[in-house]
Image (cartoon, rainbow, N blue to C red):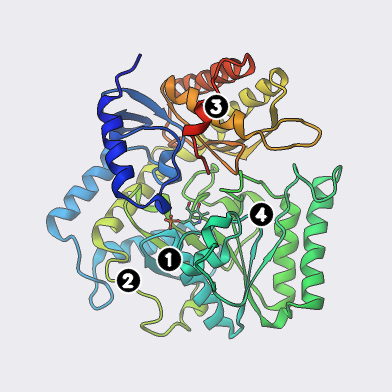
């Protein structure tokens, strides 16, 4: 039996003092430290991390190069707001972001502190630069927790219940989900065509295309359970945008910075967006976000339309520069592609064994394992997701699930083959124990899940 005395004490204190509106509870893991893909709790127990702090530490915990860059910068300047003055780390980072983001055109960048505020900035950018009021996002997308980002999101009722009214002028269109197709039996291309048709119907009936400024889309829908759209959809959406003078903005907060084996998720689909929204892993865990867009769009913004005192601060910029250096220097992207393929194969093999695995999907190290009560109806198996997640934690794995049924496999990108194999072994063992009915129902009282 593991000792969890200190963890349990801290969890009780936290839960008594902080907002329940800011916590999605899985199990009482109070973290003391992290290194690479390993987490240590307050009682000295070790875990392999399959969550990367919600996809925010792609370079792994406390990567030595990132830590060194932070320390060095903190030693000389922590903050002088770039709203009024200028500093070198921000300009160097801006140049790097311009060079790694898709699009062979002139670009500019603005910065913030969270994925949410970057989404707000993208809404402002779209409206100001096109002079059009409407913005379109997708059903079951997640964009964050500010009013603008919640207005774009459409994945969880408690997110918007009682806090309204939300931002006007936002429309939500269906996102193509090849697994849970709108009409059962549709091929991925048919799903894609169906969703494009819904946009055309909206254009003809209630969403005048000449009033639409932008589509904001996650290249892989993250929190809805890692839904990978057919490439055709993104290509057809790009064409629809071009035909109507609408911007296409790729929301890369979760799928960016190497997560899919490319710098940015949208690159897997052969489509070039007009802007990308960045957050989470950009600075390996320090609060930084940004939008990189065609220069002529950003040039329409007038101060002080979108700025933050500590946005793009020197320490976060130094961490981001080190992050890019690590991802580039250690050839992480190739590693992500290779390891992601092997990991996916192992889950697909498990699907042969366990009837409750409905679907395995994803690109690179952004893999979702969707658990169902019945492969025919595809009903979500929340109990399986909760029990397997909990049992895996008992065995030394930091695992989570979203959308009620989808195991979230998003380890730090620096995870080794051995660590990944061990992590998948633990998931397999937990699935076996679930299959045999060895995980008690009492677990379900504890796990809230996303
Ligand atoms: C796709 C996506 N966009 C935006 C956000 C919001 O980012 P933040 O929590 O840093 O505001 C998240 C966070 O989970 C996300 O997954």
| Residue drawn at point x = 31 percent, y = 34 percent | 30
Q: Which is nearer the N-term, disc 2 or disc 4? A: 4
Q: CA distance from mark 2 to mark 3?
A: 42 Å
Helix, strand or loop under label 1? helix
Pinpoint residue 228: horizontal percent, then vertical percent: 66, 46
Provide the secondary structure element on which disc 2 rests. Answer: loop
Question: For the residue with label 1, is its CB less than 8 Å from the closest atom of ligand 1?
Answer: yes
Q: Earlier in the sequence, mark 1 or mark 3?
A: 1
Give the label, 1 or 3, closer to the camera: 3
Q: Earlier in the sequence, mark 2 or mark 3?
A: 2
In the picture, measured across the screen, residue 103 lies left or right of residue 71, that is: right
Label 2 and label 1: CA atoms lie apart by 9 Å
Please tell me whether mark 2 or mark 3 is closer to you in this view. 3
Dot label at residue 308: 2
Say which element carries label 3: helix
Residue 248 percent coordinates (x, y): 62, 67
Q: Are marks 2 and 4 in contact (CB under 8 Å)?
A: no
First in sequence: mark 4 vs mark 1? 1
Label 2 packing within 10 angstroms: few (<14), some (14-19), many (20+) = some
Task: Assign the N terminus to one quadrant of the image.
Answer: top left
Give residue 270's mark: 4
Report how far apart the C-alphas of labels 1 and 3 lie in the structure. Answer: 34 Å
- The answer to whether the residues at label 2 and label 1 have Cβ atoms under 8 Å apart is yes
Could you classify mark 3 by the number of other residues whose Cα lies within 10 Å: few (under 14), some (14-19), or many (20 or more)? many
Which residue, given by chain and number where applicable, does mark 3 sit on? Answer: 387
Disc on the earlier residue, 4 or 3: 4
Q: Earlier in the sequence, mark 2 or mark 1?
A: 1
171 and 25: which one is in front? 25
Q: Quadrant of residue 240?
A: bottom right
| Residue on which the image places disc 1 | 117
């Amino acid at each position: 039996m593991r000792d969890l005395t200190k963890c349990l004490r801290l969890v009780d204190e936290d839960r008594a003092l902080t907002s329940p509106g800011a916590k999605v509870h899985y199990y009482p893991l109070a973290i003391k430290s992290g290194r690479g893909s390993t987490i240590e709790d307050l009682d000295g127990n070790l875990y392999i991390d399959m969550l990367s702090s919600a996809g925010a530490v792609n370079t792994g915990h406390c990567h030595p190069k990132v830590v060194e860059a932070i320390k060095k910068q903190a030693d000389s300047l922590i903050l002088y707001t770039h709203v009024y003055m200028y500093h070198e780390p921000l300009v160097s980072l801006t140049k790097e972001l311009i060079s790694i983001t898709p699009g062979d055109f002139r670009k500019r960048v603005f910065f913030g502190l969270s994925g949410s505020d970057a989404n707000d900035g993208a809404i402002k950018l779209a409206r100001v630069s096109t002079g059009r009021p409407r913005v379109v996002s997708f059903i079951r997308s997640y964009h964050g927790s500010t009013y603008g980002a919640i207005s774009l999101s459409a994945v969880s009722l408690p997110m918007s219940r009682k806090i309204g009214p939300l931002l006007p002028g936002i429309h939500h269109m269906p996102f193509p989900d090849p697994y849970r197709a709108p009409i059962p039996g549709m091929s991925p291309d048919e799903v894609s065509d169906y969703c494009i048709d819904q946009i055309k119907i909206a254009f003809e009936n209630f969403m005048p295309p000449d009033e639409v400024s932008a589509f904001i889309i996650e290249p892989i829908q993250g929190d809805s359970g890692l839904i990978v759209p057919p490439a055709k959809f993104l290509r057809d959406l790009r064409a629809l945008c071009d035909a109507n003078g609408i911007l296409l903005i790729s929301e890369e907060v979760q799928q960016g910075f190497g997560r899919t084996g490319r710098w940015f998720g949208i690159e897997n689909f052969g489509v070039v967006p007009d802007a990308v929204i960045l957050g989470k892993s950009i600075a390996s865990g320090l609060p930084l976000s940004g939008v990189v867009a065609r220069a002529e769009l950003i040039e329409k913004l007038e101060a002080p339309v979108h700025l933050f005192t500590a946005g793009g601060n020197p320490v976060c910029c130094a961490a981001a520069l080190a992050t890019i250096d690590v991802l580039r220097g250690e050839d992480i992207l190739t590693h992500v592609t290779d390891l992601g393929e092997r990991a996916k194969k192992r889950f697909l093999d498990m699907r042969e064994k366990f009837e409750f695995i409905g679907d395995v999907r994803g690109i690179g190290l952004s893999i979702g394992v969707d658990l169902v009560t019945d492969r025919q109806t595809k009903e979500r198996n929340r109990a399986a997701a909760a029990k397997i997640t909990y049992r895996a934690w008992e065995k030394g794995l930091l695992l989570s699930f979203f959308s009620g049924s989808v195991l979230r496999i998003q380890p730090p990108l620096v995870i080794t083959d051995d660590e990944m194999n061990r992590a998948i072994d633990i998931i397999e063992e937990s699935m076996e124990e679930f299959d045999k009915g060895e995980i008690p129902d009492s677990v379900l009282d504890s796990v809230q899940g996303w």
